């Protein structure tokens, strides 16, 4: 077998050597969009072999470890996202200001040109009349106008330099965000696998919440782990929640009187997207589901579900509050499925 790498020169003798090297080095040198490291290998047997620990305590500790890593990465991503959004707004404001400078400069240049043309005539006239005072006044006004024009030019140049620096910094922030996305996706998948394993073993929610660092004053808080067999969920039947081309008003009518957590998925008026309509505290709320090359989701970096069904199944167990503070609810009851006999409080995180 010959040497290998992603491009010439070929420096690694095997795939193992190549992977080992790029666990610590970024792939950005080959493609600026691949500013990531080969951190988390995925086996075709991963679904069966991911949880290797054989006792509940060991699995719980691993869950805690992966959850903490996920939380740290999420906080870092949120910090970068906030910084990126704020800087993007500032960049747009500076671009608008530069456009205003350009218009102002045009006006001042026209004024300078006009005053220069007429000043020659008046200066010649006042020179013949021997009126040096008026000549001095005209020259002073012209110099003030030119000086003001120069100040505006200088301000515009400084603003353009600031804009260039800020745009470069924002691109770096964007690169950092993109490099975090694969880690977030993989850590979430691993963490969820441990949650599923503990659920299947019948571990009590209070104990799982302890590992996740969630207070237990209200057992409805935190991550929900279903005690029923997943196969019995109506969520597996897409006909129970997908309603096709239905508008907001029709969706609200369909969900009227349904308990908190009742939901449906419909085609969105936004091209290429879907919408989730869900009952929260007695009101129907709507949120966009994005369809990207990576998958479906409510927002980056969570657009990672291969199908709408996968998304629905995940948010049957996890609250939407991470995407919107006013959506502290799970997708509990498909609109066409049998509803609970009483409309109790919304199933939350």
Image (tube, rainbow, N blue to C red):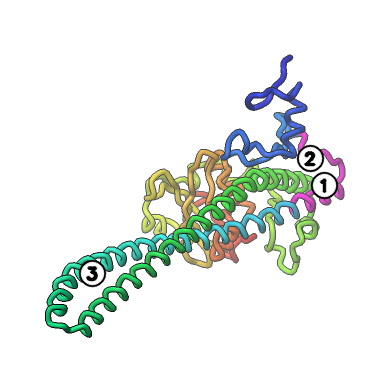
Q: In terms of sequence position, does the residue under pointer 3 or pointer 2 come before the other?
A: 2
Relative placement, left or right, of 217 versus 232 is right
Circle 1 crowding by C-alpha within 10 Å: few under 14, some 14–19, many from 20: some
Q: Which residues lie in the magenta part? A: 49-67
Secondary structure state at the residue bearing disc 2:
loop
Calculate the distance from the C-alpha at mark 2 to the C-alpha at mark 1.
7 Å
Query: In the rendering, at what x and y percent does residue 190 appear?
Result: 72, 44
Residue 6 location, quadrant: top right
Q: Nearer the viewer, residue 231 or 216?
A: 216
Relative placement, left or right, of 68 versus 83 is right
Q: Point out which mark residue 51 bears.
A: 2
Asked if residue 186 is among those painted magenta in the image, a careful observer would answer no
Secondary structure state at the residue bearing disc 3:
helix
Contact? badges 2 and 1 (CB < 8 Å) = yes
Q: Residue furthest top?
A: 1
Circle 2 crowding by C-alpha within 10 Å: few under 14, some 14–19, many from 20: some
Above-or-below relation of 19 to 96: above
Q: Nearer the viewer, residue 204 or 118?
A: 118
The residue where tag 1 is placed is: 59
Q: Nearer the viewer, residue 255 or 142?
A: 142
Q: Point out which mark residue 111 bears.
A: 3
Residue 309 location, quadrant: top right
Identity of the residue drawn at 15% across and 75% down: 122
Asked if residue 53 is among those painted magenta in the image, a careful observer would answer yes
Query: In the rendering, at what x and y percent does residue 136 appear?
Result: 25, 81
Secondary structure state at the residue bearing disc 1:
helix
Above-or-below relation of 101 to 27: below
Between circles 1 and 3, the one closer to the viewer is: 3
């Amino acid at each position: 077998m010959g040497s290998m790498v992603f491009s010439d020169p070929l420096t690694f003798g095997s795939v193992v050597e190549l992977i080992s090297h790029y666990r610590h080095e970024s792939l950005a040198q080959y493609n600026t969009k691949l500013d990531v490291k080969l951190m988390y290998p995925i086996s075709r047997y991963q679904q069966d072999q991911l949880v290797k620990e054989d006792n509940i305590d060991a699995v719980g500790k691993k869950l805690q470890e992966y959850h903490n890593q996920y939380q740290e990465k999420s906080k870092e991503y949120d910090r970068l996202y906030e910084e990126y959004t704020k800087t993007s707004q500032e960049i747009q404001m500076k671009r608008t200001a530069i456009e205003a400078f350009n218009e102002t400069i045009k006006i001042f240049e026209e004024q300078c040109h006009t005053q220069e043309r007429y000043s020659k005539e008046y200066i010649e006239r006042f020179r013949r009349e021997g009126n040096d005072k008026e000549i001095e006044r005209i020259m002073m006004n012209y110099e003030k106008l030119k000086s003001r024009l120069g100040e505006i030019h200088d301000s515009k140049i400084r603003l353009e330099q600031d804009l260039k620096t800020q745009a470069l910094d924002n691109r770096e922030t964007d690169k950092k965000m993109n490099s975090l996305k694969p880690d977030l996706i993989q850590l979430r998948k691993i963490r969820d696998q441990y949650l599923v394993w503990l659920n299947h073993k019948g571990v009590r929610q209070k104990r799982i919440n302890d590992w996740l660092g969630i207070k237990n004053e209200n057992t409805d808080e935190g991550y929900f782990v279903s005690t029923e067999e997943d196969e019995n969920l109506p969520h597996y039947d897409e006909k129970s929640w997908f309603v096709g081309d239905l508008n907001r008003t029709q969706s609200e009518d369909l969900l009227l009187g349904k308990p908190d957590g009742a939901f449906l998925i419909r085609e969105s008026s936004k091209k290429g997207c879907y919408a989730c309509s869900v009952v929260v505290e007695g009101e129907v709320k709507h949120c966009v589901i994005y369809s990207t090359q990576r998958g479906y989701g409510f927002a980056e970096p969570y657009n990672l579900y291969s199908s709408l069904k996968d998304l629905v199944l995940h948010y049957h167990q996890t609250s939407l509050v991470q995407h919107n503070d006013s959506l502290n609810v799970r997708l509990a009851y498909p609109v066409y499925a049998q509803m609970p006999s009483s409309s109790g409080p919304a199933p939350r995180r």
